[in-house]
Image (cartoon, rainbow, N blue to C red):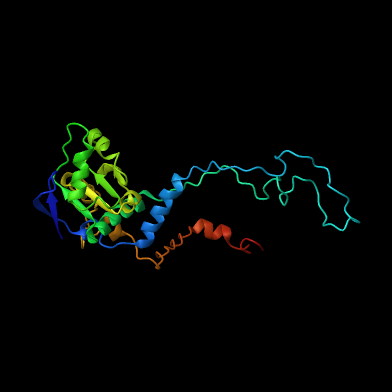
Amino acid sequence: MNLAVYDISGKQVGSYDIDPAELAPTISKQLLHDAVVMYQANLRQGTMRTKTRGEVAGSTKKLYKQKGTGNARAGGRRSGTRRGGGHIFAKKPRDFGWRMPKKALRTATRMALAARLADDEIRLVDQLPFAAPRTSVIAKLLSVLGLDQHTVLVSPDKHDENLWKSARNIAGVSVSPVGELNAYSILRPRKILMTTAAIDAFRATVSSRAKPVVVGAKSATALTTRPRGKKAPVKVPAPKPKSAKSIVGSGSKTTEGKK
């Protein structure tokens, strides 16, 4: 596919050819779902806490006798069924975080960017030069490209302090270098604004991790190992020949020499 490349003023200055299948031949929705759920779970603080009936203030004395009052039987006022009592299933601080394999997360990141490319939700700029923080410049660029009505992720090739300060005051706009992208940060905004250097760096990481496949080559160990399911023949050692002395000694008693 062919993407238009714009400059800082929003004028088209060129084009960029890229195939989404180069990043990810297929897109697994289940893998993307699992990755997003993992990142969201890791963002939870897990600091909630409520008191049990043993932790709230109050007497443990039985409110009234068990029988003869006509009321339902009741214990102390700290019971979870009464106002001011403790929680029956009290919440305690916990860690909601969990991790997926690194290879799965890398694949999910490539799939997320490939899906955004296929849906035409990525805009490219040749560069984002900022000598000083200028919010008006980045706001004008987003307006010219039609991104001012959406949540946008701005992704340069490396961290730029002036770019970050220029975009942090705009609602719905986040800045993240290409080296810090993941499946959640790519799928969360509606649109993505990347520089050509950033997408080149992303493609370089994909090609560097790709393993070449040699067709028809066999390793030396594969030729020496036997096929599965077949047992190696068992070698039976040949019997050793017995000497004449051993034969005579091991035989039964004879009657020679007896009269």
Depicted 49 relative to depicted 211: above or below: above
What quarter of the picture does the C terminus occupy? bottom right
Tag count in the figure? Answer: 0
State the residue at coordinates (35%, 51%).
184
Mark yes or no: residue 204 visible.
Answer: no
Q: Quadrant of residue 78?
A: top right
Question: Could you say which is closer to the camera, residue 57 or residue 109?
Answer: 57
Q: Quadrant of the N terminus?
A: bottom left
Could one spot residue 75 in this view of the protein? yes
Where residue 18 sits: x, y (%)? 16, 56
For the point 67% across and 48% down, which residue is it?
87
| Residue 180 x, y percent position in the rendering | 30, 43
Question: Residue at point 26% right, 41% down?
Answer: 177
Q: Position of residue 218 (x, y in %)?
A: 24, 59
Image location of residue 19, percent across then percent down: 18, 59
Front-most of residues 194 and 76? 76
- Farthest-out residue, top: 132
Furthest toward the left, the residue is: 13
In this image, 54 relative to 130: left or right? Answer: right
Q: Residue furthest bottom?
A: 229
Which of the two residues, 5 or 25, is positioned nearer the viewer here?
Answer: 5
Residue 241 found in image quarter: bottom left
- Seen from the viewer's position, the closer of residues 213 and 238 is 213
Q: Is residue 59 above or below residue 68?
A: above
Q: Please state if 62 lies on the left or on the right of 174 as rendered.
A: right
**Residue 190 versus residue 171 in the image, above or below:** below
Q: Quadrant of residue 240?
A: bottom left
Q: Is residue 126 left or right of residue 43?
A: left
> Most extreme residue toward the right, as rendered?
68
